Amino acid sequence: MNIFIADDHQMTIDGYKMILSFSNVLGDNVNFIEANSCEEAYLKINSTREINAYIDLAIIDYSMPIYRQENILNGADVCKYLKTNFPNSKTIILTSIIENVTLFDIVQNVSPNGIATKMDVNGDIFLEIIEIVLSGKKFRSRFVVEQLEEIWGNEVFINEKNRLIIHFLSRGYRISEIADKLSVSEITIKKRISKIRQSLNLNEDENILKEAKSRGYI
């Protein structure tokens, strides 16, 4: 079995490998493929494909040094690229990110077989995730499920453009710049911001970003 582990902390990779040595479902013939950045992950995926090998299981961190040349900006992008090359590979994303919008986007756009925040996981749970995923089932940690339910409870944030507007506002973009980024009119952006305010029960004088951050949307 070929297991791909991508994390920018080598100690974390070594810790995963040690825990996996106690697994009852992996068998004895396990080969590890390691990467410490998005670029290295991209190259290792390619080299594995080129020698006609396969990645059976992938454990991927979300936050890693980006690979701008190939527009691979995080572990979610690595996961998508891996699944393009190895569609039957089982994928697990473990992340320190706890913002519910980011978790929502990972689940909706990448749909890994397993996802949990690193604060959810200890050695026993890690092995449980591996067993569940390899059995063909999906794993979502309780915290992730709670964050997803919070997003679904606020319909305005299910819309990707609304989430992008909040993202750009938090980065200091002006209305005109956001409109240009999303290829819509400034009036459309203003209407969406107004709808977001209504969803958050804010009046015009209240800080939309402060409220969105307090709810975990940014």
Image (cartoon, grey):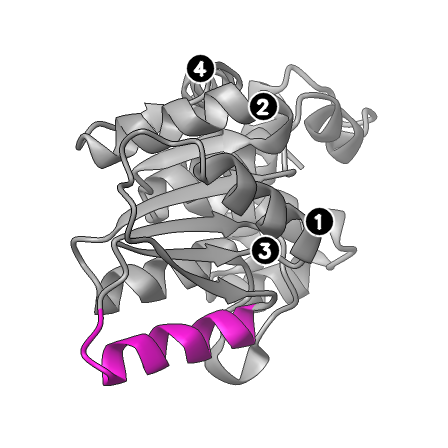
Residue under circle 2? 122
User: Where residue 9 appears, x then y in whole percent?
Assistant: 69, 55
What x and y, as percent, mark residue 29?
A: 28, 53
- The residue under label 3 is 7
Where disc 1 sits, the SS reads: helix
Residue topped by disc 4: 153
Q: Name the residue: 54% across, 69% down.
A: 38
Locate the C terminus and report the quarter of the image it occupies: top right
Q: Are marks 4 and 3 in contact (CB under 8 Å)?
A: no
State whether residue 77 appears in this view.
yes
Circle 3 residues within 10 Å: few <14, some 14–19, many ≥20: many
User: Which of labels 2 and 3 is toward the front?
Assistant: 2
Helix, strand, or loop for circle 3? loop
Q: Is residue 48 above or below residue 169?
A: below
Which secondary structure class fits the magenta region best?
helix
Disc 1 or 4, which lies upstream in sequence? 4
Q: Quadrant of the N terminus?
A: bottom left
Q: Amino acid at mark 4?
A: Gly
Sequence-wise, which precedes: disc 4 or disc 3? Answer: 3
Region of the chain picked out in magenta, as a range: 38-53
Alpha carbon of mark 4 to alpha carbon of mark 3: how far?
32 Å
Q: Quadrant of residue 175?
A: bottom right
In space, the residues marked 2 and 4 are separated at their CA atoms by 29 Å
Label whose residue precedes the other's in the sequence (1 or 3): 3
Which residue is labeled 1 in the image?
A: 169
Residue 201: percent from the left, percent from the top? 65, 14
